[in-house]
Image (cartoon, rainbow, N blue to C red):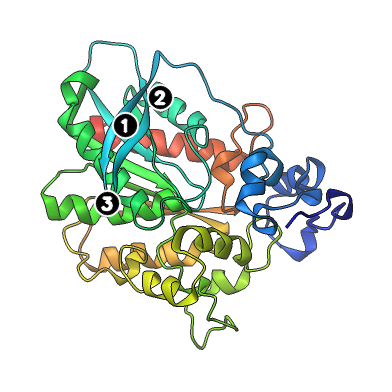
Amino acid sequence: MTVDPELQKGRLAIKAEDYPGLDPAWIEMWNEHGGADMVRADEVTIEEVRKSPGKYGFSYPTWAGPAVHEVRDIQIPVTQPAGEIAIRVYSPAGSGPFPVHLNFHGGGWVLGGLQSEAAWCRHMSNMTNMTVIDVDYRMGPEHKFPAAIYDCWDAVKWTIENAKTLNIDPKSVSFGGLSAGGHMSAVLAHFARDEGIDIKLSLMIVPATDMRYCSPKIQTLDSSHYPYESARQWRDVPWSPLSREQWFLKYWLGEDADEQERCLDTWLCTPMLAPNLENLPPAHIVTAEFDLERDEGEAYGAKMLAAGNQVTMKRYEGVPHAFAHYNHPQRGLAKSFEFIEDTAALLASVHYGL
């Protein structure tokens, strides 16, 4: 399927009166720099997207990020299924060993890569004097659920096992990710607890913790059978609607509705269903006001708190799901810069006690 761009002019334009409280800077950015006219990834096939990724995603005004002391790519082994993936290691200046944070990028488990959150990784290395490792996990449809989860877990364990080579402190490890990466961070916190691996922080940024509402079997999304208001409230927003989430899951879980439902009914896919939430690593959950995944992230945080865990949460008002990406130093969103400052302070605190 190919959508003619000439038929798209202005069709996704945002009107401020339709979304009271939405950041005016975001509205202007979207309307004036291509969002209003774009063809979204979920409106074409993944093959079309891969031919020209920038064409089907709103990336203005992201940037590569600041210079860091050292950047190197390393191939590491993974196990389920057996193979190799790349990691990108951002290292600060100094003698070390340094604390380390592993990042799992967003992109619905089918898009994205080492460029997705490169700017944030670079900022964190510079601002916290830490090593940051970005994980290029395998994605669908070639590597369906749950391969990406186990790739990320293998990366955590490999990092700890190779601490000396990486010049990192194996007892000062944290991890996190955005959206799909936030989902996997939630799952990996359970893995860490169950395997006795000490993790300083699980950072879940706009995480997908309960996407059962994306099942193609659900014909009507209403409060009688689904508890999250944000999923109902923002299901048709131009920038990241329900159809986009369903598109991701089609390629990660498979197109068969019964198979999707089977996966979504497991806690590995839906952390809200985890049978035991006790004794998890400390966590911080970031949500965005105008995000259909907002309430599931906050509900998961509340459930973790109720189980006795150390959890902090912050909702960033007025912004959409991917607000953290818009961090260009001259043309970015204020909330994205706030997010960078917040997460740098948080990571410095958990690793250095600052």
Circle 2 Cα neighbour tier, 10 Å, few/some/many (<14 / 14–19 / ≥20): some
In the picture of the structure, the residue carrying the numbered disc 3 is 188
Vertical side of 83 occupied by 10: above or below: below
Rendering coords of residue 279 (x, y %)? 16, 58
Q: Secondary structure at mark 1?
A: helix
- Residue at 50 percent across and 50 percent down: it is 110
The secondary element bearing badge 3 is classed as helix
Q: Is residue 283 visible in this depiction of the protein?
A: yes
* Amino acid at circle 2: Met
Occupied quadrant, residue 59: top right
Local SS, label 2: helix
Q: Position of residue 315 (x, y in %)?
A: 49, 55
Tell me the quadrant of the picture where the C terminus can be found. Answer: top left
Mark 1 = which residue?
Answer: 348
- How many neighbours does mark 1 have within 10 angstroms: few (below 14), some (14-19), or many (20 or more)? some
Give the mark nearest the N terminus, 2 or 3.
2
- Residue topped by disc 2: 127
Q: Earlier in the sequence, mark 1 or mark 2?
A: 2
Type of amino acid under label 1: Ala
Above or below, 217 against 26 in this view is: below
List x then y, in percent, for residue 54.
67, 38
Q: Are marks 1 and 2 in contact (CB under 8 Å)?
A: yes
Please tell me how crowded label 3 is: few (under 14), some (14-19), or many (20+) other residues with Cα within 10 Å.
Answer: many
**Front tag of 2 and 3:** 3
| Left or right of 349 in this view: 197 | left
